[in-house]
Image (cartoon, rainbow, N blue to C red):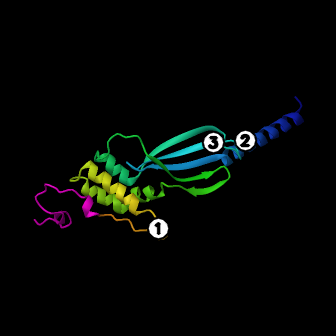
């Protein structure tokens, strides 16, 4: 081969590789989902042909929210089919779109909810904690008047009676020697 054609092929190959990677990056759709029952998360990346909905291949990565870790470590959620809700999606020419999972995401990533679950996990049943998580997600949704409601972190009607010998106030006070 002559040197000029070798240089032309090299430049053409580099341009083709850059073009393929650019279109691959542009055609990537990222979707962040959360399970409303256990707080597990997943990121789904779909590699699509740009400007179409044709998916060439996809890749899924699993994760866990902070409150979900508490639920998992304390074995407070039984095996279940995940109830995935889209928190957000973006890519392939589409702007960031929030989905119905944004309320569950706010609950499972809240430090207040995580701390509260750590406290009640030792003396509340699975069903009571499931009711609490469901109620927290419901109170985080916007109200009909358009104003967002504050999440209720402690709803006494959801807490079951306990067989502990002392009241819950003893957990908040330091022990006396």
- Given residues 82 and 118, the one toward you in this image is 82
Alpha carbon separation for disc pair 3 and 1: 38 Å
Name the N-terminal-most of marks 3 and 2: 2
Which is closer to the viewer, label 3 or label 1? 1
> For this view, does 132 lie left or right of residue 101?
left
Q: Quadrant of residue 48?
A: top right
Quadrant of the frame with the C terminus:
bottom left
Task: Please provide the residue range marked out in magenta.
Answer: 155-177
Q: Which mark is residue 144?
A: 1
Label 1 crowding class (10 Å Cα cut-off): few <14, some 14-19, many 20+? Answer: few
Identified at 68% across, 52% down, the residue is: 93
> For this view, does 53 lie left or right of residue 128?
right
Name the N-terminal-most of marks 2 and 1: 2
Secondary structure character of the magenta stretch overall: loop
Residue receiving disc 2: 20
Residue receiving disc 3: 47
Tell me the SS state at disc 2.
Answer: helix
């Amino acid at each position: 081969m002559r040197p000029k054609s070798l240089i032309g092929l090299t430049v053409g190959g580099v341009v083709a590789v850059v073009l393929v990677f650019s279109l691959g990056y542009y055609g990537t759709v990222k979707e962040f989902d959360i399970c409303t029952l256990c707080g597990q998360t997943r990121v789904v990346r779909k590699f699509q042909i740009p400007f179409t909905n044709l998916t060439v291949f996809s890749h899924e990565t699993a994760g866990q929210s902070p409150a979900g870790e508490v639920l998992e470590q304390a074995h407070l959620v039984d095996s279940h089919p995940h109830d995935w809700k889209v928190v957000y999606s973006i890519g392939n020419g589409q702007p960031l779109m929030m989905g119905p999972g944004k309320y569950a995401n706010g609950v499972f990533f809240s430090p207040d909810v995580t701390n509260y679950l750590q406290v009640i996990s030792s003396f509340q049943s699975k069903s009571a904690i499931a009711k609490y998580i469901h109620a927290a997600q419901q109170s985080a949704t916007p109200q009909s008047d358009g104003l967002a409601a504050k999440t209720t972190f402690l709803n006494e009607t959801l807490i079951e009676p306990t067989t502990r010998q002392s009241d819950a106030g003893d957990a908040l006070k330091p022990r006396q020697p």
